[in-house]
Amino acid sequence: MTTDQIILFSLFGAVFGLLLWGRFRYDIVAFSALMAGVVLGVVDSKHAFDGFGHPATLVVALVLVVSAGLVRSGAVLLITRTMVDASRSLGAHIAIMGVVGGVLSAFMNNVAALALLMPVDIQTARKAGRAPGLSLMPLSFATILGGMITLIGTPPNIIIAAIREESLGAPFKMFDFAPVGSVAAIAGMVFVALVGWRLLPVRDDGALRAEDLSQYIAELVVPEDNKHVGKRLFELDETADKADVAIIGLMRDGKRRYGNARNTKLRAGDALVIKARPDALDEFRSTLSLSVADASREERLRADGDGVEVIEVIVTPESRLHGRTAQAVGLAWRQRTILLGLSRRGTNITSHLRQTPLETGDILLLLVPRDTAQHVTEWLGVLPLANRGLAVTENSKVWLAIGLFAGAVVAASFGLIYLPVALGLVVVAYVLAKIVPLSELYTHIEWPVVVLLGSMIPLGAALEASGGTQLIAGALTGLTEGMPAWVVLTVLMIVTMTLSDVLNNTATTIVAAPVGIQMAQTLDVSPDPFLMAVAIAASAAFLTPIGHKNNTLILGPGGYSFGDYWRMGLPLEIIIIAVSIPAILVFWPL
């Protein structure tokens, strides 16, 4: 080995060792290795930061912003609102959620897809009286499997396409991964839905309980042109139940209706009095196209600036609100703030929220102009609760968000426009249409992943330029010399899959993809089947909670231990290899 190869292998060994240790965050480890490579002379200083402008890095960042736009617009809610049905059997629930999660993760980042569906799954588990751990791991695995189907579903596919463009002159297209990825995903989901979840341990401890969130009393008004005008109140019960909302009354002409209120036909201007968590409140409002109690002021807030946000605060004895009503304080006209909900345990609210005297300890749900939360809380003299990422769904822009994204996917799929450019145009359109507020544009980008990619790509390029990947490829080729092609692909998948189970799948792909190309060149066959094998294997990280971020996300809410993952993950990885090798040889012949 040359000196450069020794240094680079040492750097990669140090990176992998530190990632396994977990003492330092992965982006710091990768960036430190890049700087060390520059200082030691194995990475050209002129190209040290090329990875940050690499198409793979840009696509990963843009996909996260687009995913946030689809969520905020209510596009994803159109699908997920039908998923909460506690009466289904566990197997049926896992199958349905798995299919939805797989489809969503094919067209949006699979981490974002899980983050969206995880609260839905926990909510269903709570209503069904079962531990969330029985269904969260199947959901996580389904979203990982779905990401294998398209170019933008998971970072390994994006990286593989970019490496192919650099090495062979053309990238993989949007749906080039679909034939093999679909076979692997379908086989994996069938196993997870029918058998896999039965292999998980059943626990009843506190770690498995869903998060206890504040329940608010809130008012939602029926607008003039609402399609539910004329319906009886009880006809909304099914929708309320799915959203985990309790309808506790009806206000008309400023008075609470009692007695036969549930049989009352709804009129425009009626206010539904409900009890719900903040996320359930927003889902119910969006599903029925209802308005907040002060709808006209909300419209002015949205039109004035960069949108609105939701905050939670606690009334203190020194607060302006103590002993007074929101209306008396002038909350709406002085601070352009709307009282959405009130949480006061053990007490019924019988008057309009804005006319209810507030007490110390009351928890308020407030709709405020964006970026004014600190000013509003200081003026009111209240204590803000920790930010839970609450957002107001902009359901009026749902079809605009879907149309823009669908147009970009179609254009990129037919080669009419370069994918990073197409996604970039979608992001610009989302910002201009205020689907994604400008102030939140960069908060949705996972910067540690961007730094990891930007740092590892130059290191991977240096390893390839030094002949390091050729050495690894030669060792694997020598190990499988004289064996059939399917054996060679199997060995490559096993090695890649093993690395991905203990390392970040992005780092694994950057190292394994050039190795696959070198193996193909040594055998004098097409590199595409080897790249597909790496793409599937790098994504198939099911044995540990550290191999894929989705597995890490469910660790706490599911109450899992480190050793729980292999129970369902090991047979799943064996199935993925068993079905992927024949599919690769059929769709991407040597």
Image (spheres, rainbow, N blue to C red):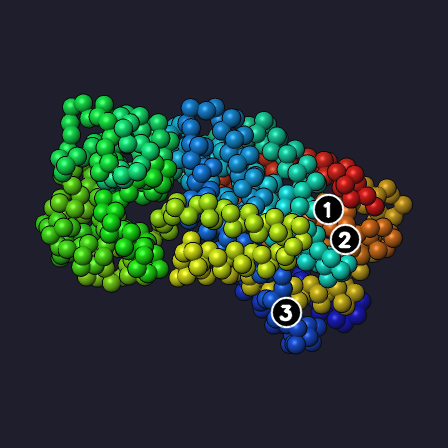
Please provide percent x and percent y for residue 92. Answer: 51, 26
Residue 62 visible to an observer of this rendering: no
Task: Check whether the beta carbons of the residues at disc 3 and disc 1 lie within 8 A of each other.
Answer: no
Q: Is residue 247 above or below residue 494?
A: above
Element carrying mark 3: helix
Of circles 3 and 1, which is in front?
Answer: 3
Which residue is at 55% across, 44% downward? 105
Please provide percent x and percent y for residue 158. Answer: 64, 54
Q: Which residue is mark 2?
A: 516
Q: Is residue 501 above or below residue 580?
A: below
Question: Distance of mark 2 from mark 1, alpha carbons?
Answer: 8 Å
Whichever of callouts 2 and 1 sits on the residue coming sooner in the sequence is 2
Q: Is residue 461 above or below residue 201?
A: below
Instruction: Please state if 414 lies on the left or on the right of 285 as rendered.
Output: right
Mark 2 Cα-neighbour bin, 10 Å: few <14, some 14–19, many ≥20: many
Quadrant, the N terminus? bottom right
Residue 12 falls in image quadrant: bottom right
Mark 1 Cα-neighbour bin, 10 Å: few <14, some 14–19, many ≥20: many
Which residue is at 46% across, 24% downward? 88
Please provide percent x and percent y for residue 19. Answer: 58, 57
- Amino acid marked by disc 3: Asp
Task: Check whether the beta carbons of the residues at disc 2 and disc 1 lie within 8 A of each other.
Answer: yes
Please provide percent x and percent y for residue 121. Answer: 45, 36
Question: Distance of mark 3 from mark 1, alpha carbons?
Answer: 27 Å
Whichever of callouts 3 and 2 sits on the residue coming sooner in the sequence is 3
Q: Which mark is residue 381?
A: none
Q: Is residue 285 above or below residue 419?
A: above
- Amino acid marked by disc 2: Gly
Q: Which residue is mark 1?
A: 533
Instruction: Please state if 250 lies on the left or on the right of 434 as rendered.
Output: left
Q: Which residue is mark 3?
A: 50
